[in-house]
Image (cartoon, helix red, strand yellow):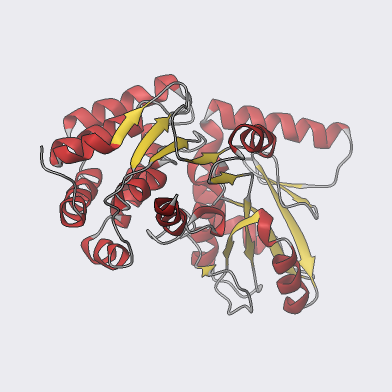
């Protein structure tokens, strides 16, 4: 079998991207099956993920990304502990390992153990040499480095077990939006994708908005009406009902449009079906707060020019990262290229 080269991998990923945009019958079957193993993975949400990943794998951006990467001739075994909060959330880690020429030891999440293997199977059909760089494992052993994604709680265990090898250990993060008060209804409607896509379960989902003092909240609620059908999903509805009952019983001040609860809160992490908001007097104070809390924030969504180290993402685009948009601001490729020197 021929060895994997950057050119072969670029061609394979481009072809895979086209397949994601137009799923085959086999892939459509997997999409249908996924929801029976994880009720959050409805066909519509899975297809959103496929579309986003397929869009990421376009020829121009693949060429640009690979121009910055050196594929090793001395492959290392990289353990990948994948999350399962949204469909195929671990895909980018897998292609980073492939792009650097290393070997991915994949520990699947039980919440998402159907979709990613199906996608990788298609990738191997397109380019068989990729098979030598993929292993699925139940228990991690004989690895040279670790990339683990989980919660703040699980990260403590990851630190304990993997702290002696090169590692990237990701914790909980949330995303925020900053509004000027002058957004158009279309811009707010687009922001709805950042809030509601994947039912709000991703770290790139907006869980909190910053609004100017005396912001008229009806300007925010009305454009979001198109997302009302989300309440028909039983698990989302259960979370909405639970949080609403807690707020009502404890007389917690909140706003309610029938499918989203909006509560004033200084925290960045809101419960599912709840969006926190906080008023600001000046953008300078928000910029300082974002910089202070940088390690807890994945994305900042806004249409304003802000003085931040973090890139600002336009409304509706938080779930459409580029190949070089690395989780937790840690350059996965740079990490993988460093382990070659072990």
Using the rendered image of the protein, determine whether residue 213 is visible from the camera's viewpoint: yes
Q: Is residue 104 left or right of residue 261?
A: left
Q: Is residue 9 left or right of residue 34?
A: left
Residue 22 lies in what quarter of the image? top left
Task: Count every numbered label the image shows and give the total.
Answer: 0
Classify 201 as above or below 263.
Answer: above
Quadrant into which the N terminus falls? top left
Q: Position of residue 94 (x, y in %)?
A: 36, 43
Rendered residue at 47%/35% (across/down): 82
Q: Is residue 200 left or right of residue 5?
A: right
Q: Position of residue 237 (x, y in %)?
A: 60, 30
Rendered residue at 23%/32% (across/down): 121
Rendered residue at 29%/27% (across/down): 30
Residue 126 lies in what quarter of the image? top left
Classify 96 as above or below 70.
Answer: above
Q: In terms of depth relative to the viewer, which is nearer, 127 or 21? A: 127
Q: In terms of depth relative to the viewer, which is nearer, 254 or 171? A: 171
Classify 84 as above or below 298.
Answer: above
Using the rendered image of the protein, determine whether residue 208 is visible from the camera's viewpoint: no
Q: Position of residue 166 (x, y in %)?
A: 53, 46
Seen as rendered, the residue at the extreme left is: 1
Residue 151 lies in what quarter of the image? top right
Seen as rendered, the residue at the extreme right is: 251
Q: Position of residue 335 (x, y in %)?
A: 47, 55
Q: In terms of depth relative to the viewer, which is nearer, 26 or 73? A: 73
Q: In terms of depth relative to the viewer, which is nearer, 22 or 97? A: 97
Seen as rendered, the residue at the extreme front is: 342
Classify 164 as above or below 26.
Answer: below
């Amino acid at each position: 079998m021929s060895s994997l080269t950057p050119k072969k991998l670029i061609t394979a990923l481009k072809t895979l991207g086209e397949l994601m945009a137009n799923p085959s019958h086999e892939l459509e079957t997997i999409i249908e099956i996924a929801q029976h193993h994880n009720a959050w993975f409805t066909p519509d949400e899975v297809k959103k993920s496929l579309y986003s990943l397929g869009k990421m794998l376009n020829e121009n951006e693949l060429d640009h990304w690979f121009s910055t990467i050196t594929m090793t001739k001395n492959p290392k075994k990289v353990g990948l502990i994948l999350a399962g909060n949204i469909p195929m959330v671990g895909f980018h880690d897998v292609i980073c390992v492939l792009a650097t020429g290393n070997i991915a030891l994949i520990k699947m999440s039980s919440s998402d153990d159907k979709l990613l293997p199906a996608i990788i199977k298609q990738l191997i059909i397109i380019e068989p040499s990729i098979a030598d760089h993929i292993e699925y494992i139940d228990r991690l052993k004989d690895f040279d480095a670790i990339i683990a994604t989980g919660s703040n709680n699980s990260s403590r265990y990851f630190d304990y077990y993997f702290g002696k090898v090169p590692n990237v250990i990701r914790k909980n993060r949330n995303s925020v939006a900053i509004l000027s008060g002058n957004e158009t209804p279309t811009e707010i409607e687009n922001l709805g994708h950042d809030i509601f896509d994947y039912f709000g379960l991703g770290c790139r989902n907006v869980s909190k908005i910053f609004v100017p003092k005396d912001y008229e909240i009806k300007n925010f609620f009305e454009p979001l009406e198109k997302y009302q059908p989300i309440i028909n999903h039983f698990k989302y509805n259960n979370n909405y009902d639970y949080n609403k009952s807690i707020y009502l019983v404890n007389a917690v001040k909140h706003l309610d449009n029938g499918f989203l609860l909006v509560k004033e809160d200084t925290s960045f992490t809101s419960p599912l079906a709840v969006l926190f908001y906080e008023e600001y007097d000046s953008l300078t104070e928000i910029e300082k707060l974002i910089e202070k809390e940088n390690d807890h924030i994945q994305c900042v969504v806004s249409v304003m020019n802000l003085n931040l180290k973090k890139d600002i993402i336009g409304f509706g685009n938080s779930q459409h990262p580029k190949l070089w948009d690395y989780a937790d601001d840690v350059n996965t490729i740079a990490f993988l290229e460093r382990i070659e020197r072990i």
